[in-house]
Amino acid sequence: MLMASLSDIGLAAAINILSAFTFLLAFAVLRIQPINDRVYFPKWYLKGLRSSPLQAGLFVSKIVNLDFKSYIRFLSWMPAALQMPEPELIDHAGLDSAVYLRIYLLGLKIFVPIAFLAFSVMVPVNWTNSTLERSNLTYSQIDKLSISNIPTGSNRFWTHLVMAYAFTFWTCYILKREYQIVATMRLHFLASERRRPDQFTVLVRNVPPDPDESVSELVEHFFLVNHPDHYLTHQVVHNAKKLSSLVSKKKKTQNWLDYYELKYSRNQSTRPFKKTGCLGLWGDRVDAIDFYTDEINRLSKEIELEKDRVIKNPKYIMPAAFVSFRTRWGAAVCAQTQQSRNPTVWLTEWAPEPRDVYWDNMAIPYVSLTIRRLIVAVAFFFLTFFFMIPIAFVQSLANIEGIEKAVPFLKPFIEIKVIKAFIQGFLPGIALKIFLIFLPSILMIMSKFEGFISTSSLERRAATRYYIFQFINVFLGSIITGTAFQQLDKFLHQSANEIPITIGVSIPMKATFFITYIMVDGWAGCAGEILRLKPLIFYHLKNFFLVKTEKDREEAMDPGTFGFNTGEPQIQLYFLLGLVYAVVTPFLLPYIIVFFGLAYVVYRHQIINVYNQEYESAAAFWPDIHGRIIFALVISQLLLMGLLSTKEAANSTPLLITLPVLTIAFHLYCKGRYEPAFIKHPLQEAMMKDTLERAREPNFNLKEFLQNAYIHPVFKGDDDSDSEVMSEKWEEQEPVVVQTKRQSRRNTPLPSKHSGSLSS
C-alpha cells in the first residue's frame, strides 16, 4: 500500500518554498528601509564606507523608504551578490571567507553532474520495475524511484555498481582539483599579503623552570644561543584574567557615565540621578555623574594595582612566550623544528595572528591540556548518546502515527490533507532543528575548556565534534529506530560486517524524512539567515532601550561571522546525504542542489555586506573539508555494500570492496601532496618574501612593528596616547640581561642591538 505520494512531498515542498519565499520577500523589503541600514550593511559601516541615511531628510523618510522604484527591484541583491570577482572578494573579506564560499560551489560541482547522470540512467532502471507493487510492504512513490524497487538477485544491480564507481571517480576528481586550487590560493595569499606579525612570530610553550633565571631571561638566552642570527625579540605571557574582568567592568561603567553626561548636556536644568541598588530599582538615590565618576576612579586604581602585580609578580608569568624573528625564514625554521633533545619542552608552533589569539586560554598550564582533553572526550561521548534520547522522543511524536497515538481525538483534524502535509513536510525537521539550537554553544565551551589558544582552532575543533554529533544523531539516529543506547548495545553485540547491512537496509525508507529536513533546514534556513530576524530585533531593542551613545550604537550593530563551527558541519551533512542517496534514492539530489545554489548566493551576499570575520587563517580549515567529504564517500560505499548484500547481488557486491580502498588511497595521496601547504610554510616561499621586502624597504624597523603585536589587549590603551604610555611602561619593565653563574649559560652572548625582550 502507498504511505505517501509524490503529491504529498510536492505539497510539503510548496510549504517550505512558500516559507523561504516569504523570508526572502521580507528581507527584500526590510533591507531598503533606512532604519534597518545598520543591520543589513554593517560591514560597510565598519570599513567607514557607508554613512547613516538617518542623518538628513524628512522624519518619515528616515524610517521608511519612499522610493517606490526600489521596491520593484526587490531581487536586485541576488545579481549584486554575484558580481564581485573572487580576487576582489579576497581583498574585501579575506581568504577564509572566499574559500568558505567555495564549499557551496564544490557541492554544485559534485552533485549537478551526478544528478544528471542518476536521473538519466538509474531512475529509469529503478522505475521500470514492479517489485514494490507486488509486495505487501508499506512504501511511497519515492521508493519506486529508488533501489528498493529492484527485485532481489536482479542483474540491474550492475547499473548501481557502475554508477557507484562513476560517482566516486567524479567526486575524487573534483576534490583533487579543488584541493589544488585552494592550496595555490593559500600560498599566493601568504606570498602577496602585506606584512603581518604572525609571519615572524612563533609561540613557545612548556618553557622548563629554572631557579636562576626568570622565564623572560630564560627565553632570551635560549634563542640567542640556538637562533643567534635570526632571533629579534620576545613577549612572555601573563595570566591576566582578573585584569581583563576589571577592564571590562570599567568599560561598562564608562558607557553609563557617557550616557548621563550626554543626558545632562541636553538638559542642564536638572542633574541626572540613579539608585545604587540592584538594576537601579532600589537603594540610595545619588547623583549619577558623580557616582559613575567615582566608580571609574576606583576601578582605575584597581586596574593600575593589578597591572603592576601582573607585570612584577613571577606567579603571573606563564611558561610561554611569543618569540619574534628578523625574517620569515627564521620563524619558519623555528616553528617547524624540534628545539631541544627533550621533545616535551621548548615546544614551538606558529603563533596565531594577533586577532586570532584566544587570550583566556593562554594562562592554562600546558601540562594540564592532556587531562582536559581526556575529560572533554568522555563528556562528549555521553553528550552524544544522551542527546539522542530527547531527539528520538520528539521524532517519534513528530509524525502522523505518533501524534494520533498520543492525542487520538485530533485524528480527524490531522487527516486533513493540508495539515497532514504540514506535519510530514515541516514538523520533523523543525523539531530536530530546535533540539540542535543549544548544541554549538555547548561544543564551543568544551573546546575552550580543552585549552586551544586561537579562535580558529576553537572553531575547527567545535566543528569536528558537531559533525560527529550530526553523523551519529541526525544521520544514524534518524535511520535506526530506538534509543541511542539500544543502538549502541545492538552494534556491540553484532559483528562489524553486519553493521553496514543493518543501516543500509534502513536508508531507502528514510529518504522522505531527509528530503523534508533539507527543505526545512536548508531552504528555509538559508532564507532565514539572510533575513537576520534575531539581529534585527535585538538591534532595535538595544537601540531603543540600551543605546546611550554613538559608541553603543556601533556595538549594537553586531555583524557576526559566517560561523564555521556551526555552518560547515551543516554543509557536510548535505554532502553525506547526497553521496549516500546518490545511488540509493537519486530523487533526493535536486533538493540538495537547490540548497547549495541558494546558500551560495545568500552567504556571498552576507560575506560582502554583513559578516566581519574576526580572524584570518588563510583557509587552514580546507583539509578538514576534504577529509569529511572523503569520510562521507567511504560511508556511502560501505552502506551500499551492506544494502546490496541483502539483495542477493553476490556477483556485484565484492567489486564494491575495491571502492573504499581506492578512496582511502586517494585521500592519503592528497594528504601527502597538498596538506603540507596548510600546516607548514615552505622555506623557499619565506626566503623569497624576505628578499623582496629587504629590497623594497631596506630600512624598515621590524622590531618597532612587532613590539606591541602580542601584548595582551588589556595592556593596550584605547587611543594612541595610552598606547605610548603602556609601551614606555613595558620598556621600563624590560629585564636587564645579566651573566648567569651556571656553567651551561657561560657562553650566552650579550644582547645585540637587534635583540630585546618584552612582556605581555
Image: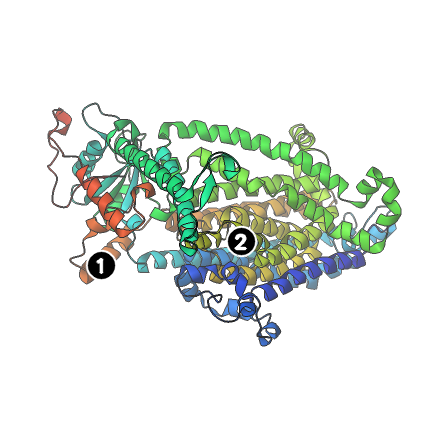
The residue wearing badge 2 is 544
Q: Secondary structure at mark 1?
A: helix
Identify the coloring: rainbow
In terms of depth relative to the viewer, which is nearer, 140 or 223?
223
Instruction: Answer with mark 1 or mark 2, whichever residue precedes in sequence.
Output: 2
Placement of 596 over or under 428, stated as above or below: below
Q: Label 1, on which residue?
A: 693
Q: Please name whichever residue, 635 or 447, is drawn nearer the observer in this view of the structure.
A: 447
Q: Is residue 261 visible?
A: yes
Extreme residue toward the front, this view: 269
Q: Looking at the image, which residue sits at the far top?
A: 211
Residue drawn 11% across and 32% down?
747
Residue 383 percent across, percent down from the top left: 59, 33
Badge 2: residue crowd in 10 Å (few <14, some 14–19, many ≥20)? few
Q: Are marks 1 and 2 in contact (CB under 8 Å)?
A: no
Q: What residue type is disc 1 on?
A: Glu
What is the three-letter code of the residue carrying label 2? Answer: Phe
